[in-house]
Image (cartoon, rainbow, N blue to C red):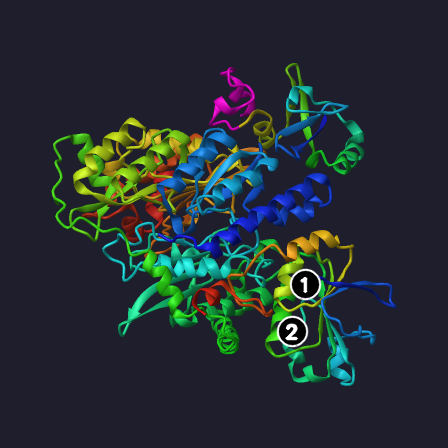
Amino acid sequence: MKLLTGNDLATGDVVWWTGQDWSRHVEDAVDVGVHGEAILRAEEGARRVNVPYLIDAEATPQGPRPAHIKDRIRALGPTVRPDLTLKPADADAGAWVI
Amino acid sequence: MYVYDEYDQSIVDARVEEFRDQVNRRLSGAMTEDQFKPLRLMNGLYLQLHAYMLRVAVPYGTLDSRQMRMLGHIARKYDRGYGHFTTRQNIQYNWIKLADAPDILAELATVQMHAIQTSGNCIRNISSDQFAGAAADEVADPRPWAELIRQWSTFHPEFTYLPRKFKIAVIAADEDRAAMRLHDIGIQLLERDGVLGAKIFVGGGMGRTPMIAHEVKDFITADHLMSYLEACLRVYNRYGRRDNIYKARIKILLHEIGVDAYRDQVEAEFAAIRELGIDPPLAELERITAMFAGPAFATDAPDTVDRSDPDFAVWLDQNVAAHKQPGHAVVTISLKPIGGIPGDASADQIDLMADLAERYGHDELRVTHAQNIVLPHVRKADLHSIWTALRDAGLAEANLDLISDIIACPGLDYCSLANARSIPLAQKIGERFAGRQRELGELKLKISGCINACGHHHAGHIGILGVDKKGTENYQLLLGGSGAEDVSLGKITGPGFDEDGVVDAIERVTDRYVELREGGERFLDTYRRVGMQPFKEAIYG
Amino acid sequence: MVDPITVNTNAGETLLRFRDDVVHDEPAVTLDAFLGQTNATAVRLEAGDDARELLDHLGQIALVEISFPTFRDGRGYSAARILREAGFEGELRAAGDVLVDQIPHMRRCGFDSFAPEKPIDGPTLTKLLALYPQPYQKAADARVPVWKLRHG
């Protein structure tokens, strides 16, 4: 599957395209299929998200898992500061990244 | 320390307003990201993996307790309670909102700080020796010269869109504690016939093509320093490569045209520029130098220290250096606790270090290029009190220049350029060697998470470079680098490793070193004597 | 002068000028063409051209146009200073990808005319030009550096 991601222009937060809007949670991301480029251009024009780009991901029962470790770290947060990730209470969250 | 006058303050204040306006234009859509990016970078604002990152300048690594407390305040109010001290003596915050950046700069300006030119293709923060003004071996304090260069380079109208970034370091001792010859321009102050002047090295740098700077000017006095630097930069601005970002640093220009041709071109420019009256009068250097006169030291401070507490004695031997003033010492506070994140300090730790500087250290702190903090002027009689306070705050790791005193870039945990994580590796190495690091002696280990080499891996006695090998993290090992006065570039041992594999390989290297070392040899000395082969055999069998 | 005069040229360009003489109407020729036919009075320098090649001819040149192929290419700043340092008093025009935030630095390097590809917002420029009370360093303009203010 293909996901569309970027960083929120004002806050810098990592965000994922949900089909209508942007979410901070990769679980909300949808497969943009062949429409990625068109959505990317429209959203870039709307200026809400900084440098949006398309990535490959795998559909899993827990939700989309980005193919590259860099995007998995983006999706979770720094592996060396679990307290600052999006899942501070989940001790296994780091294993999802590696 | 340098103290702003009304002119300095008005310039920094104007910068805050300029950036506020630029941010507003970006948020309103009047500017594209492509147009905004170089402007935000020139104020140290990056977009990293998780958020914007703001790099705040600590000119030549010197700050007072009020400034240090402001760094803690910013960590608390605008970030997530911590900051990261960098190899260029700056501090960066990892979780900044674009809309907050102008307010942060406004707060910094109230304590004479800023983020000017901490990134971008311009002249960056001037770095220096963290022991400046305290070191027994310096011919002069290098910081007045660094401040003179800071002012000259700030918003330099001709050199704001250089081919690539430009880093300058100034030292004034034979021992190089600032990796001077790995800078685009390295300046070493020295005295000749009773006159203070500068030897100029050009074309050093790390990155993907590491090079050691060449001497291009034997001696230049302060009255023509700016003309000379202007000539150096002009030749680079005109002829540095702009067709390939990876070949755009000045080191590549020198490599391609040769040192002699570069020197000739600079001399021709210099001959013209020196007549233009762009050099400040010597009175300006004297004005600045007077502010660095240093504190009034107690002349009767006792020179002996009670070493009866064994933990304290270990720290004393490892992290405390000689001061030029009897009864005084230079303390290095390690930001490398075993298992911690190299260079990170919490807001509370930052405040504590500020308190110690104010109470015991003539109100001065330094940031080192090895990502530690220095209290440059403390009385020996206060060392135990300082150590106790540091220990209670988790800041008393006695590992200066040992294998766990690791320089590491933020790596893939934070950085959008990284290929591999650096910090978890630093943590594993620290944990593996904590018990025997003193036995191994001075061993500078440096980790970069990509070939841009922010973690100085080329200059590590042991260096590690993280790469992306088909989507997984892989680490190459280098041996034999040095960023000090015995500068050299490390060589790759051979095929790379995974994270645990590289820690094992380092253990085999250090075991072999212990077998081979003679007398008081450091790892680097042994390596230079015996070469790569014995270590290769130890690693790869 | 503090604020520019906006001029529309015959060629359809919009110029921002910080000079009040008449716009030079001879089209600029390339450096090669200029050096080959010495009666031209307007020259266009591409970013990689050596401005020093003009130094023997400055007396006959009324306009030098310096090209900025992208705003990131800073070679033109040095070209401008070289010409001003050699005493050139004619019009020095920055043409191409010139952005409003760059114009204050360009003014300091000696440019006194601008032909930006995209329109420049006048109020923003006015604000930027007045922003910094004094510069740290001496450049090709008349602004007095801080060290001179400190020491006279």
Q: Name which of mark 2 and mark 1 comes first in the sequence.
A: 1
In the rendered view, would you say B83 is above or below C47?
A: above
Q: Residue at x 81, y 34 (%)?
A: A38
Mark 2 is on which residue type? Asp
Q: Position of residue B308 (x, y in %)?
A: 12, 32
- Residue B208 visible within the image: no
Q: Nearer the viewer, residue A47 or B6?
A: B6
- List the residue tagged with mark 2: C50
Q: Nearer the viewer, residue B228 or C63?
A: C63
Q: Is residue B260 magenta?
A: no
Taking the image as shown, residue A76 lies to the left or right of residue B478, namely right
**Residue B67 appears in which quarter of the rendering?**
top left
- Residue B280 visible within the image: yes
**Numbered range of the magenta stretch:** A78-98
SS at circle 2: loop
**Residue B396 appears in which quarter of the rendering?**
top left
- List the residue tagged with mark 1: C2
Mark 1 is on which residue type? Val
